[in-house]
Amino acid sequence: MHVLKKIQFELPQIHELAATIIKTYQDKSKVLCFYGEMGAGKTTLIKSLVKALGGQDVVSSPTFGIVNEYNYPDGRLLGYHFDFYRITDEMEALDLGLIDYLQTDAWVFIEWPENISSFIPENSTKIKLEMAGTKTRTISLS
């Protein structure tokens, strides 16, 4: 992963960080791939991204349902949130219709993209979160 930017932040700064990510990447790729160990803050960052985009849905990790859909208050589609933690075979992602989701103009947030690496678009934004302390995280963007 070629790192373009590495930032250290604390949880109260996550909303600022989300706004920066949207501003930086909205015209490049709306497919954001989140890497990091369990508890690193992937879902928390996605919650902030959805809020910064104007979504009002309750954001939670779709670990058991695999995908959640989020909308704007007026009902228009905002994006999709995938959690591929439980995927053991990449073909399961195809069975869910992943390719169709990736071809929309909606935001696509993918947790555990390493489990479906063959299907990640070349132009996706890779976001790696690492714990740097109990309340501090490091984010690497590429």
Image (cartoon, helix red, strand yellow):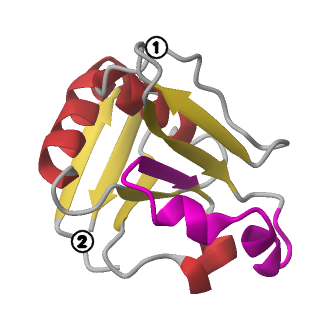
Give the percent coordinates (x, y) of residue 47.
Answer: 48, 27
Which quadrant of the structure image shows residue 60?
A: top right
Left or right of 37, for residue 62: right
Point out which mark residue 56 bears: 1
Which quadrant of the structure image shows residue 23?
A: top left
Comparing labels 1 and 2, the label whose residue is closer to the camera: 1
Mark 2 lies on a secondary structure that is: loop
Quarter that holds the N terminus: bottom left
User: Three-letter amino acid code at disc 2?
Assistant: Val
Q: Residues within 10 Å of mark 1 (few under 14, many from 20)?
A: some
- Name the residue at 40% across, 15% down: 74
Image height of 44 relative to 106, above or below? above
Q: Nearer the viewer, residue 118 or 129?
A: 118
- Name the residue at 46% across, 14% down: 56
Q: Residues within 10 Å of mark 2 (few under 14, many from 20)?
A: few
Sooner in the amino-acid sequence: mark 1 or mark 2: 2
Tell me if residue 139 is in the magenta stretch.
Answer: no
Give the percent coordinates (x, y) of residue 8.
Answer: 26, 43
Give the percent coordinates (x, y) of residue 89.
Answer: 84, 79
Mark 1 lies on a secondary structure that is: loop
Q: Nearer the viewer, residue 140 or 68?
A: 68
Q: Which residue is mark 2?
A: 3
Q: Which residues are magenta?
A: 87-110
Image height of 1 relative to 127, above or below? below
